[in-house]
């Protein structure tokens, strides 16, 4: 990895960075500005941050998907006075023009290249850690994990962090249970204005988008199998069902399985679903949800995709072994594995399909997620001394403020309780 600092065409100096091509910056700026139009809540927060400077002089290290929406979050943190260093949280999620624009136009230290191999990916993580952040932001817990395992000497200087994903929160809770997590982390993923909208509507739409961009298959009438019926799985199934697909859900949680059934979907084991399905999407955050025995039962032409954060839900080593080298790229972002006459098609290398084969969530839904991120970082900067090491929920006041600002930006007005109604709800004396 080459980290450079050099002059731009203007009077400023480029921050330390490692990106694919700074020549892409102009296109990145256009796309960042387009996304900003759909992010009015974050824009309002940025305007306030620019006036109040609540993060003045604080170093923020962020490991997030480097997209147009993330660029607007980084700009918001910089407007608050933070010194931001950003790296990618997935090798296929980086938009190279956005990374270039962050460096060349906005002066934000960025380490991200689409298609980075493991060495480059971890080199970028270490480059962000080298900036000695006092606040961390994660999308999958990789930065927190790296610092705890390989850089424990930095922990005393970290005030707190945020985490964006379900997978990351699971990892953080495991760290807490082991007594390993050494500073407070706000689970942004747990905010209602995040998981009820980003996970459900954002991932639902962008997963369909990624699969369609990669394959251009007709979904109406198609047998679609979704593994996992959390908020992400709910969103995916609803969107595929709305496009006319026949959807089956694979779940291990009996309550979620009943919910899927009553939402109108079939419920199967993966063993039952393997010969039935034509499109398979994993959304569990767990290991080897689709494995060797399932590949052996799948029909010719089946499409495999993953919407979980890491590329472990589909057993890729087993798939490669079964194909015995008979692998070829048949379309951009689609690898065909020939299992001796039956061909299975893997989208986006088994990585996050909505970012690997499309552009990720629409900006309008990321507006709420990143508003939560920005306000949670501000909260940590002001309240870290009151928080113990461990996982913390987003304060209810932040959740409500994000919802209020979003509704206001959409021109919506809500009723308010009258004093009589408020008193009635607070009383236990009134009965039949």
Image: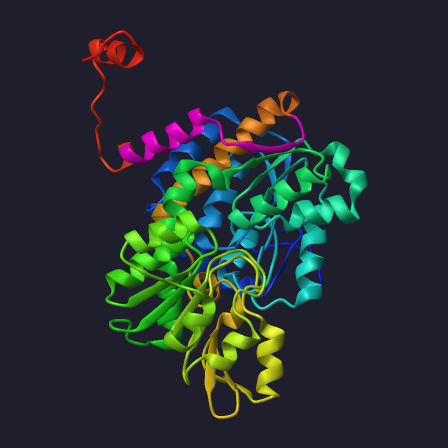
> Residue 403: within the magenta?
yes
The location of residue 166, given as percent across then percent down, is 52, 47
Residue sitting at the far right:
153
Q: Residue at x 23, y 20 (%)?
A: 416
Between 161 and 285, which is closer to the camera in this rendering? 285
- Residue 347 image point, x, y percent: 47, 73
Q: Quadrant of residue 17?
A: bottom right
Tell me if 21 is positioned left or right of 70 in this view: right
Total number of numbered discs in the rendering: 0
Is 386 on the left-hand or right-hand side of 95? right
- Examine the rendering and report whether any part of residue 231 can be seen: no
Image quadrant containing the C terminus: top left
Quarter of the rendering occupied by the N terminus: bottom right
Residue 211 shown left or right of residue 323 in the figure: left
Given residues 18 and 281, the one toward you in this image is 281
Residue bounds of the magenta highlight:
388-407
Res 302 quadrant in image: bottom left
Say if the magenta span includes residue 292: no
Q: Nearer the viewer, residue 83 or 195?
A: 195
For the point 58% across and 29% down, which residue is it? 380
Q: Main structural element of the magenta stretch: helix, strand or loop? A: helix
View extreme (left): residue: 432
Residue 121: image x %, image y %?
Answer: 66, 61
Q: Residue furthest bottom?
A: 341
Residue at 44% in and 35% down: 46
Residue 348, relative to residue 424: is it above or below?
below
Which residue is rendered at x = 52% and y = 92% of the image? 340
């Amino acid at each position: 990895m080459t980290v450079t600092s050099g002059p731009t065409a203007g009077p400023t100096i480029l921050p330390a960075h490692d990106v694919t091509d700074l020549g892409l910056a102009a296109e990145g700026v256009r796309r960042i500005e387009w996304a900003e139009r759909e992010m009015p809540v974050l824009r309002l927060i940025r305007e306030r941050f620019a006036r109040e400077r609540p993060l003045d002089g604080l170093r923020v290290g962020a490991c997030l998907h480097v997209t147009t929406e993330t660029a607007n979050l980084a700009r918001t943190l910089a407007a608050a006075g933070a010194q931001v260093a950003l790296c990618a949280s997935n090798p296929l999620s980086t938009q190279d023009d956005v990374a270039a624009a962050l460096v060349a136009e906005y002066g934000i230290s960025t380490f991200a290249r689409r298609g980075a191999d493991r060495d480059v990916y971890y080199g970028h993580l270490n480059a962000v850690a080298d900036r000695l952040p006092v606040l961390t932001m994660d999308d999958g817990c990789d930065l927190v994990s790296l610092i705890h395992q390989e850089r424990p000497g930095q922990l005393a200087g970290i005030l707190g962090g945020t985490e964006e994903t379900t997978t990351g929160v699971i990892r953080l809770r495991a760290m807490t249970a082991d007594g390993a997590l050494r500073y407070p982390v706000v689970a942004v993923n747990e905010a209602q204005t995040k998981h009820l909208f980003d996970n459900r509507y954002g991932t639902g739409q962008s997963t369909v988008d990624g699969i369609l961009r990669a394959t251009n298959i007709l979904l109406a009438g198609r047998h679609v199998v979704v593994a996992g019926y959390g908020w992400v799985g709910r969103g995916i199934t609803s969107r595929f069902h709305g496009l006319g697909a026949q959807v089956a859900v694979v779940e291990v949680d009996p309550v979620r399985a009943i919910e899927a059934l009553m939402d109108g979907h079939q419920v199967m084991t993966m063993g039952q679903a393997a010969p039935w399905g034509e499109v398979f999407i994993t959304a569990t955050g767990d290991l080897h949800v689709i494995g060797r025995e399932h590949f052996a039962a799948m029909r010719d032409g089946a499409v495999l995709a993953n919407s979980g954060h890491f590329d472990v839900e589909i057993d890729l080593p087993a798939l490669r072994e079964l194909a015995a080298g008979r692998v070829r790229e048949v379309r951009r972002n689609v690898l065909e594995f020939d299992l001796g006459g039956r061909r299975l098609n893997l989208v986006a290398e088994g990585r996050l399909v909505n970012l690997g084969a499309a552009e990720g969530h629409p900006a309008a839904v990321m507006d709420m997620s990143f508003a939560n991120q920005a306000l949670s970082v501000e909260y940590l900067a002001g309240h870290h001394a009151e928080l113990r090491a461990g996982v913390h929920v987003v304060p209810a006041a932040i959740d409500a403020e994000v919802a209020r600002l979003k509704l206001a930006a959409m021109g919506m007005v809500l009723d308010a309780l009258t004093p009589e109604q408020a008193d009635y709800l607070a009383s236990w004396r009134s009965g039949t």
